[in-house]
Image (cartoon, rainbow, N blue to C red):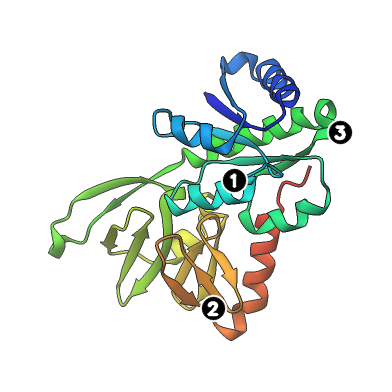
Amino acid sequence: MRFAIVDDMEVTLKILSDLILKYTAKHKAEVDCFSSAQSFLKKYALHKYDALFLDIDMPEITGFKLTDILHENHDNIPIVYVTARDDLITNAFRYKPVGFVRKQHLESEMKFAIETVISEISAMKSYISFTERKSLGGKKYTTKINDILYIKTDRHYLEIFLINGSVISVRDKISNYSDNPDFKDFVMIDTGILANLANIKIIEDNAHFPDGQILGISRRRVQSVLQAYIQYSKKVLI
């Protein structure tokens, strides 16, 4: 298990690193510290981090901007925002972090933050297998549930859209997914369309996906989708 910390204050980097190592002792975690978003991005391609503890209020590239860069590269790394400014927490909801830690309460809030991150990492490693419809070859696929953008019905089949641009067509019913506890973070945005809350942004009455796709939310589902989206976005508020 490997974590990255990005903060422009050296003292905060040291405290966060020590607390992460303290609360992940049984997982034998590694921690890399970066004093700027730029230095993190230079090393990021070389390592696969399990989670990122990220300062919001940094010069040049802010925590929000760095999050945008990661999302543009289809990276859904779990993020815990670290900030001394409570006024930035509300703005952070749209990025759907797994949590927040206030710098003035590092000692008391980091334990719960780390427990939440470890739980999120476990969920992200959940896989599901599909068998492609026979007419298309019948190939078997295994993918992370979190890599699914949305599932759409197509008569007697389902089309499963993945974050890497692939589309898998299977013979199945959408209820087998909407009723599956492993898909608890998915929501029906329209009849026959089940979307992954981890991979969308809600703008007005539309669901925007990282690959540029935009799907409309049906009028009768707008309120329930917004409620699910808000609950998902702030499911961890430290």
Residue at the image point whose x is 65% and y is 44% from the top: 98
Q: What element carries label 1?
A: loop
For the residues marked 3 and 1, what is the alpha-carbon distance in whole angstroms?
23 Å
The label nearer to you, 3 versus 1, is 1
Residue at the image point whose x is 57% and y is 29% from the top: 4
Q: Which residue was labeled with disc 2?
A: 217
The label nearer to you, 3 versus 2, is 3
Q: Which residue was labeled with disc 3?
A: 104
- Sooner in the amino-acid sequence: mark 3 or mark 2: 3
The image's mark for residue 145 is none
Percent of width and height locating residue 113: 72, 34
Whether residue 108 is situated above or below residue 161 in the rendered picture: above
- Residue flagged by tag 2: what amino acid is it? Ile
- Residue flagged by tag 1: what amino acid is it? Ile
* For the residues bearing labels 3 and 1, Cβ distance under 8 angstroms: no
- Is residue 50 visible from the viewing direction of this image? no
Residue at the image point whose x is 28% and y is 57% from the top: 166
For the residues marked 3 and 2, what is the alpha-carbon distance in whole angstroms?
40 Å
Residue at the image point whose x is 43% and y is 63% from the top: 150
Q: What element carries label 2?
A: loop
